Amino acid sequence: MFNPSEVDVDGLSANAIDVKPIDFNFGEGFDETWEVVLPDFRGLSREALEAWLDDHGVGLDDREWNVQGLVRLCEATSCDEADGYTPMMNYAYPLPNYNGIYGYDQLSLEEIGSVCLVDIGGLYYLALTGGGMDLSQDICLGYIALGYLPPLHFCRLPDFAGQKLNARMNLILSACERTARISARRAVNLLEDISRHRAKLAVEAT
């Protein structure tokens, strides 16, 4: 499960800092061009399984549930609630070289808010399960939860009223700051390359 206080920002991959959202119509092609990714509950503790069921309003009866039975109940519940893992907005957010455990990662994303993992033609992307407001923070945190620094495109974060500098917000800001620093360093290197190219052409022209 995702715990913001356990994330090492310096260990996050920079592979996604240049990506931008792509248009994708989730209103068509379901199970043909794209698929919902359901959570994988195998390997979770009894306490984690019971907590997930409780969060989803599933009460346990007086039977003595073993872990395998709890896993099956969680799987059945997630199938019934598959809409919660279905994109609402027609944008997909690339995950370069993603090699995570997608079913387990979906569980982590569920804790974050309005982001989910989707399979588009065998490649995995983030997508939004909500809308109506600026969800840059959720998108950034989704990337972080999957081991990436957030894309620079989303690092200009909204300033919502009543926001507090809690562990979650501090993580987002720290990760965005690192993204910005890496992007700035790359821009400086590019300017130096351009200057060298200009100087070389100037010498050749004489």
Image (cartoon, helix red, strand yellow):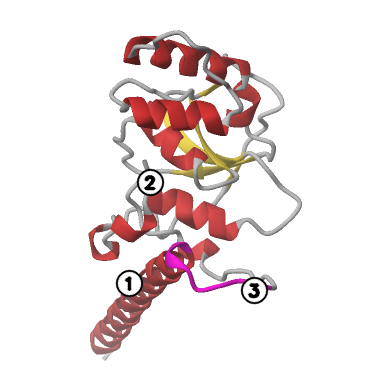
Of marks 1 and 2, the one in the foreground? 2
- Lower sequence index among marks 1 and 2: 2
The residue range painted magenta reads 162-168
Locate the C terminus by quadrant. Answer: bottom left
Q: Where does residue 153 sit, x and y in percent of width and height?
A: 52, 63
Distance of label 2 from label 3 (alpha carbons): 24 Å
In the rendered image, residue 197, in percent from the top left (x then y), is placed at 29, 79
Q: Residue at x 54, y 62 (%)?
A: 154
* Residue underneath mark 3: 159
In the figure, residue 106 lies in which quadrant? top left
Give the quarter of the image for residue 162.
Answer: bottom right
- Quadrant containing the N terminus in the rendered view: top left
The residue identified by callout 2 is 2
Res 119 visible: no
Whether residue 153 can be seen here: yes
Is 32 above or below relative to 110? above
At 41% across and 43% down in the image, what residue appears? 95
Q: What element carries label 2?
A: loop
Residue found at the far right of this picture: 132
| Residue under the image location 28 percent in, 24 percent down | 43
Residue at 64%, 73% (x, y): give it: 159
Mark 1 and mark 3 residues within 8 Å of each other at the beta carbon: no
Residue that label 1 marks: 182
